[in-house]
Image (cartoon, rainbow, N blue to C red):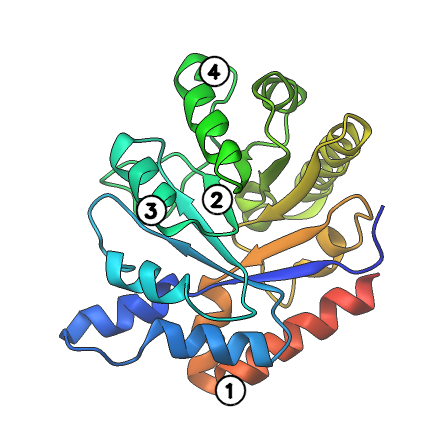
Amino acid sequence: MTDHLRLGVNIDHVATVRNARGGDYPDPVRAAELAAQAGADGITAHLREDRRHITDDDIARLAQIEGVRLNLEMAATDEMLEIALRQLPQATCIVPEKRAEQTTEGGLDAAAGHNHLARFVREMSAAGMRVSLFIEPDPAQVEAAMRLGAPVVEFHTGSYANLEGEAQAEELRRIADAAALAAKNGIEPHAGHGLTFDNVGPIAAILQLHELNIGHFLVGEAIFTGLEASVTRMRELMDLAR
């Protein structure tokens, strides 16, 4: 269990706004620096295969920011492995990726993909990166992460965010149980996807969780209040839940 719940801010959609018109504004690196100043413990960026938002140059520049931990979200492909080994972010998170999806639609099937994933976990761990698997809050997936030797898992909270009432409460219990199982077996549990000011509290109250990764909502809220205010408010709500 941990008292301080880390906040990782995903700055992908700052790049989405930039890419809508081309050029170099707004700059995701500036967003990363502002988020860190406002209380983010790290920055997450997803370098997609189609480069729809974050670019290779963004990752190279983000990896050079002093004192800011970079978590590179990536598909399990040879191209992404080569980039990770070249840029050496402090952390990587292997996520499922489909070209047609608007956003990540669910967790990685680490159980079915064991043979494919093993090399990625092994090589990035050997290079000093902390490897995470983005999975559903399911015991079979936690057990698969254990077999793969992944030190971290991140639970997909998208279903929780989209549900209401008793169905949401049941999904919250699934996340809490999965976090407890991971922690019991020496894996550090994180969570993320679809979290907002309104729904983050119950997730943040799960004491086994060490980190939440939140992006789209914070960047969207920044349009109205500014990025520093958006991150600061999320930080306050997470702390209040602990």
Q: Position of residue 141 (x, y in %)?
A: 59, 22
- Residue sitting at 25 percent across and 81 percent down? 25
Quarter holding residue 204: bottom right
Q: Residues within 10 Å of mark 1 (few under 14, many from 20)?
A: few
Residue that label 4 marks? 114
Q: Residues within 10 Å of mark 4 (few under 14, many from 20)?
A: some
Q: Earlier in the sequence, mark 2 or mark 1?
A: 2
Q: Amino acid at mark 4?
A: His
- Residue sitting at 69 percent across and 47 percent down? 165
- The image quadrant where one finds the N terminus is top right
In this rendering, would 164 be left or right of 10? right
Separation of residues labelled 1 and 4 (CA atoms): 43 Å
SS at badge 1: helix
Q: Position of residue 103 (x, y in %)?
A: 36, 48
Separation of residues labelled 3 and 4 (CA atoms): 24 Å
- Residue sitting at 23 percent across and 40 percent down? 100
Which-is-in-front pick, marks 2 and 1?
2
Q: Earlier in the sequence, mark 1 or mark 3?
A: 3
In this rendering, would 140 be left or right of 11? right
Which-is-in-front pick, marks 2 and 3?
3
SS at badge 2: strand
Q: Is 47 situated above or below 216?
A: above
Separation of residues labelled 2 and 1 (CA atoms): 30 Å
Residue that label 3 marks? 86
Separation of residues labelled 2 and 4 (CA atoms): 17 Å
Residue that label 2 marks? 92
Q: Amino acid at mark 2?
A: Thr
